Image: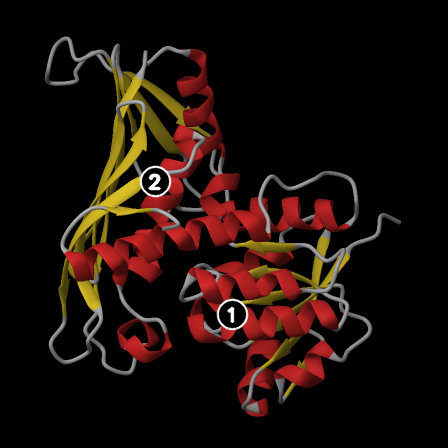
């Protein structure tokens, strides 16, 4: 019988219950064996609902379970680093929700994780075939030289009890969804931005960034611009502009797990896009693809292209964006 990775889930966060745990359970190389909450009753309710054998009333108890190989950490942002480090020191590999930290300095603390343990920031889009196909098209040269990437990611949430609206624990749009366009640029340009400039507007009551527009300079004439908002109509878009053609990922970030997705490639003749080529990708749960890739890495069958240093690099970009908010000008990444 093929060995499966035994997962423990830290917290009963909605993203875990609604999306990630069911997706992990569909991974051929995974099984979810335990879930923990600081409220044992919540853990037991989640375990019963999702068919998870064990429930714990503390995170520490779950980490101490010797029958768990890997942890999924969807806790609020300020708990990502400390619980991830603790999990690795307890002998577990960790898939941690994005953003990996609140600042790059905090993320650098992950270098203290136990040696030999895999730590992956959960940008599930990198495992979806539509993103892999988009990068393949870019690499092929069909678009010509890539000049710019434009991205939008927005939703509307004004609930004061929602962790996304709590500034002191890492709430706000840039850390919640702005990190996706940052990942978009790093993934598709396959390089790091050199400098950024940002215009940020904050909610007067929450203190969180509710609207941000960012321009990122990737050098060699390459730019990425994006807008993210937590208080706008829901929308998402990724468009890659090349010297020969443009590429659009139709549903870039929240691709439905049970529906096909599409990429369009358009030379701009005619301008209305009526002659654009449309590539259809099969239905795919990107959270399952992520879990399976992680499990295969833990089993030693394949390696992951991303780890702690990649997560730190992403946080350095976000740090620069927040620094630009304060200075009103360009900030070099990593400065």
User: Answer yes or no: do the residues labelled 1 and 2 have beta carbons within 8 Å?
Assistant: no
Colour treatment of the image: secondary structure
Q: Residue at x 54, y 69 (%)?
A: 81
Nearer to me, 72 or 204: 204
Answer few, some or many: residues within 10 Å of disc 1's Cα (few below 14, many 20 plus, some between 14 and 19): many
Nearer to me, 32 or 313: 313
Q: Which residue is drawn at 22% across and 58% down?
A: 155
* Mark 2 lies on residue: 252
Would you say 332 lies left or right of 79 here?
left
Would you say 140 lies left or right of 199 here?
right
Residue at disc 2, secondary structure = loop
Percent from the top left, x then y, of residue 146?
31, 20
Q: In this view, does 94 lie above or below 165?
A: above
Q: Distance between the residues labelled 1 and 2?
A: 25 Å
Residue at disc 1, secondary structure = helix
Q: Quadrant of residue 158?
A: bottom left
> Is there any visible trace of residue 186 in the rendered image?
yes
Percent from the top left, x then y, of residue 262?
35, 29
Mark sitting on residue 67? none
Percent from the top left, x then y, of residue 37?
56, 84
> Is there any visible trace of residue 54 in the rendered image?
no
Q: Quadrant of residue 88?
A: bottom right
Q: How many marks?
A: 2
Nearer to me, 307 or 63: 307
Q: Quadrant of residue 50?
A: bottom right
Would you say 74 lies left or right of 223 here?
right
Sequence-wise first label, 1 or 2: 1
Q: Residue at x 62, y 89 (%)?
A: 57
Q: Which residue is drawn at 28% across and 83% down?
A: 161
């Amino acid at each position: 019988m093929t060995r499966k990775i035994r997962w423990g889930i830290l917290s009963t966060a909605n993203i875990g219950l609604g999306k990630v745990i069911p997706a992990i359970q569909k991974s051929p190389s995974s099984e979810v064996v335990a879930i923990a909450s600081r409220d044992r009753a919540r853990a037991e309710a989640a375990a019963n609902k999702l068919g998870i054998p064990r429930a714990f009333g503390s995170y520490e108890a779950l980490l101490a379970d010797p029958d768990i190989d890997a942890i999924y950490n969807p806790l609020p942002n300020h708990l990502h680093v400390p619980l991830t480090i603790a999990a690795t020191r307890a002998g577990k590999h960790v898939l941690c929700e994005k953003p990996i930290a609140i600042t790059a300095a905090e993320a650098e603390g992950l270098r203290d994780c136990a040696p030999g343990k895999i730590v992956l920031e959960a940008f599930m889009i990198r495992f979806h075939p539509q993103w892999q196909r988009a990068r393949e098209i870019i690499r092929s040269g069909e678009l010509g030289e890539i000049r710019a990437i434009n991205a939008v990611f927005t939703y509307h949430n004004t609930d004061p009890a929602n962790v996304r609206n709590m500034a002191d624990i890492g709430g706000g749009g840039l850390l919640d969804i702005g990190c996706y366009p940052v990942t978009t640029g790093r993934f598709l340009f396959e390089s790091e931005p050199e400098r950024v400039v940002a215009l940020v507007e904050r909610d007067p009551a929450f203190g969180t960034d509710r609207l941000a527009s960012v321009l990122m300079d990737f050098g060699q004439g390459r730019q990425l611009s994006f807008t993210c908002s937590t208080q706008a109509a829901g929308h998402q878009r990724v468009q890659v502009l090349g010297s020969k053609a443009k590429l659009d990922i139709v549903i870039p970030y929240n691709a439905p797990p049970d529906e096909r997705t599409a990429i369009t490639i358009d030379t701009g003749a005619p301008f209305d896009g009526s002659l654009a080529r449309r590539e259809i990708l099969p239905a795919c749960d990107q959270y399952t693809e992520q879990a399976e890739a992680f499990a295969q890495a833990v089993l030693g069958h394949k390696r992951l292209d991303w780890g702690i240093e990649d997560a730190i690099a992403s946080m350095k970009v976000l740090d620069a964006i927040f620094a630009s908010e304060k200075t009103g000008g360009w900030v070099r990444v990593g400065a």
